[in-house]
Amino acid sequence: MAVRVADRIAEVPPYLFAELDRRRAAVAARGIDVIPLGIGDPDLPTPEPVVAALRAEAGVPSNHRYPDYEGCPAFREAAAAYMARRFGVSLDPGSPPRGQVLALIGAKEGLSHLVWAFCDPGDVVLCPDPAYPVYAVHTRFCGGVPYRLPLRAELGFLPDLDAVPADVARRAKILFLNYPNNPTAAVADLAFFERAVAFCRRHDILLAHDAAYVEIGYDGYLAPSVLQVPGAADVAVEFHSLSKPFNMTGWRIGFACGSPAAVAALAIVKNNTDSGPFTAVQRAAVAALDLPRADLEGRIEVYRRRRDRMTDALRAAGIAVPRPQATIYLWCPVPAGETSAGFAGRLLEEAGVFVTPGTGYGPGGEGFFRISLTCPDARLDEAARRIAAFGRP
């Protein structure tokens, strides 16, 4: 007797990063030295004060019990204080239905659960293309219809909201945005967020902003929060992650904030699905959010140096890659006559350099590949050397 999975599972392609990791492992198993530039997993350690806080909190017996569903008060208050300090945004850290901060087991969990809180079968969700795959995949999971918003280089990889057809806007429940952007590394200014908030208010759409890379900016650039737009908290919820700025990908901790109605709806899904982040991790995350700005800037400087070294090397090899203002990624054009998947596959098989094909993020990623800067300098230099040699006849 064959086991039959649900149609929603059968129709979803393999998760991009799991599939890429499988391919990388298969090549490495043949004895090839693979340089991993595909997944954005920081190679630097979590700051020691955060690790020390976890050691202490893990020994507190009360932290071993079920956590508060909405997150412990100390973490929600620290998140609200961070938003006030960094963006000048005032939030109520209290409990739903009036509270505006909710602890998450990583931003990915919150982004996926948000769709279940708002999207009924047949509803439209406006998803950028290319984009983090979770937005469209979970829309399909719950029977919704992803409507792809092209991100084009000539528009700065910002969606043209005025081009959304009126009938699509009427059916839409959620607009996903993500700036600084993964995978394109593009940035958005406050004026764009003002237009996006106005669009969502006009069409009664929830604006969901994935702000996972908001703290990683270069050359003096500081990314804004959508919640800085006056009245944005009426129609917007923002997702923050401690993974990238604090090298805490394995800790699975983040928070959602903004619209009390959206936070409360998300909390209902979570209350019936999970039990919240381990309280000791939440309390250690308070130490992360309280770190001095100079601590964060030290890590950003490492990425800035890597950005410059890699873009210089790629340009010298004939790849016209922009020098981004933010994120830990480079969004690179594939050589003429190549496809994204074909180039990335050949680069892995023939040069042992593992990059992400742009089409892994949607059809709009064709013609590009993504490089992650989460690799030691010496390995990045070697990867650049191999890419240059790979491109020579």
Image (cartoon, rainbow, N blue to C red):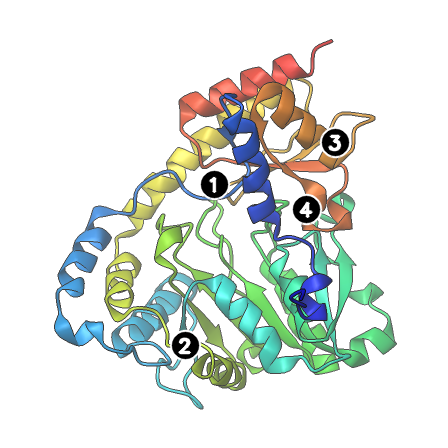
Q: Nearer the viewer, mark 3 or mark 2?
A: 3
Q: Amino acid at mark 2?
A: Val
Q: Nearer the viewer, residue 28 or 316?
A: 28
| SS for dot 1 | loop
Residue at 31 percent across and 51 percent down: it is: 293
Q: Amino acid at mark 1?
A: Tyr
Residue 391, horizontal then vertical, whole percent: 69, 16
| SS for dot 2 | strand
Q: CA distance from mark 1 to mark 2?
A: 28 Å
Q: Amino acid at mark 4?
A: Gly
Residue at 70 percent across and 49 percent down: it is: 157
| SS for dot 3 | helix
Residue pointed to by mark 2? 101
Left or right: residue 73 versus residue 140 is: left
Residue pointed to by mark 3? 342
Q: CA distance from mark 2 to mark 4?
A: 32 Å
Q: Which mark is residue 360?
A: 4
First along the sequence among labels 3 and 4: 3
Q: CA distance from mark 3 to mark 4?
A: 12 Å
Residue 321, horizontal then vertical, whole percent: 65, 30
Q: Which mark is residue 218?
A: 1
